[in-house]
Amino acid sequence: MRAMAKTTCPVTRAQFVEKAEPLKIVINGSELIAEVKEFSTGSFGWYLNGKVLVPIDGKNVSVQVGMNMTVVGSKEAEK
């Protein structure tokens, strides 16, 4: 069985930090902003933490949202 090739990140860490922009994420019609982040693991991507309201049986329920979006291969990206 062949091992899958590791994905190489197409941008350097410096390019990401300089050029990446916050991302708008929409959950159930509520807009949240995922901020550009370098994670303590050495990888980079976007991070989002917030709350949205979700209706259930006519009542709004507050939902905590936590999201990490990591660029695949970024941990090994060129410094």
Image (cartoon, rainbow, N blue to C red):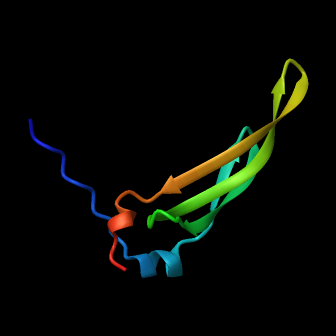
67 over 9 or under it: above or below: above
Residue displayed at 51% across by 62% down: 45
| Quarter placement of the C terminus | bottom left
Q: Nearer the viewer, residue 10 or 77?
A: 77
Residue displayed at 18% across by 52% down: 5
Q: Nearer the viewer, residue 55 or 3?
A: 3
Q: Quadrant of residue 35?
A: bottom right
Q: Position of residue 70 (x, y in %)?
A: 47, 57
Residue displayed at 47% across by 74% down: 16
Give the farthest residue toward the front. 40
| Quarter placement of the N terminus | top left
Q: Position of residue 11 (x, y in %)?
A: 37, 73
Residue displayed at 44% across by 81% down: 14
Give the farthest residue toward the left. 1
Q: Position of residue 77 (x, y in %)?
A: 34, 71
How many numbered discs sit on the rendered protein? Answer: 0
Q: Position of residue 28 (x, y in %)?
A: 73, 38
Q: Is residue 60 left or right of residue 72?
A: right
Give the farthest residue toward the top. 57
45 over 61 or under it: above or below: below
